[in-house]
Image (cartoon, helix red, strand yellow):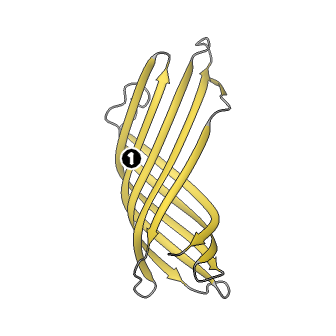
Amino acid sequence: MWIGRENSAYPAAWEIQMKGLKRINEWGYGLLLSGYRYKDKYNIENLHGQNIHEDILLVYLAPQISYRQEETLFEGVGAYYEAGIGYTLYHNRSRHINEIEYANLSGAGGNITIGLDYYFTSQWGVGIETGILGSILKNRNSKWMLRSKNNIKILQINAAIGLKCRF
């Protein structure tokens, strides 16, 4: 049973998108590189102060196709819909007692994103989006951490609000 977590645990998500260098009507294309990093330390009851230290990295790379609608809600606001199928890499380094385990899993994944943006100049704007990324990864090399699982399913739901820049 987990009895506590360290205060030093942190999740960090990042994303790099290259989109639509050339649009054909409302359709565009691009590339999505998305990542997630998480480090944590768990205390385990009945193991006299023993901890599990985890360091997880999830990376997703996929070509994207997008559809854009201009002036959806009011003047200047555009909506976009994106989807892609790509490659997911999962890396987990765990330390339990004095044993270190590495789990390196990979497989196919897919993503869907919808969003709204408003550009107040030709180059700068603000946007809001939400998306989902799902992957099924084959488990081939885990000794104890994930050994009972043949396939690992990952579902990541995200939302973002931020500043946008067109190049």
Marker count (numbered): 1
In the rendered image of this protein, does residue 94 appear above or below residue 36?
above
- Which image quadrant is residue 111 in? bottom left
Q: Residue furthest top?
A: 48
Q: Residue furthest left?
A: 140
72 left or right, relative to 108: right
Q: Residue at x 40, y 74 (%)?
A: 29
In the rendered image of this protein, does residue 158 appear above or below residue 45?
below
From where the camera sits, is residue 1 visible?
A: no
Q: Position of residue 12 (x, y in %)?
A: 57, 46
> Which residue bears the numbered disc 1?
89
Q: Residue at x 37, y 45 (%)?
A: 137
140 left or right, relative to 10: left
Q: Residue at x 57, y 16 (%)?
A: 50
Crowdedness near tag 1: few (<14), some (14–19) or many (≥20) residues, C-alpha within 10 Å: some
103 left or right, relative to 68: left
Q: Position of residue 117 (x, y in %)?
A: 61, 75
Q: Position of residue 9 (x, y in %)?
A: 62, 35
Q: Position of residue 131 (x, y in %)?
A: 54, 62
Q: Residue at x 44, y 28 (%)?
A: 145
Callout 1: helix, strand or loop?
strand
Name the residue nearer the viewer: 107 or 12: 12
Q: Amino acid at mark 1?
A: Leu
From where the camera sits, is residue 113 visible?
A: yes
Q: Quadrant of the N terminus?
A: top right
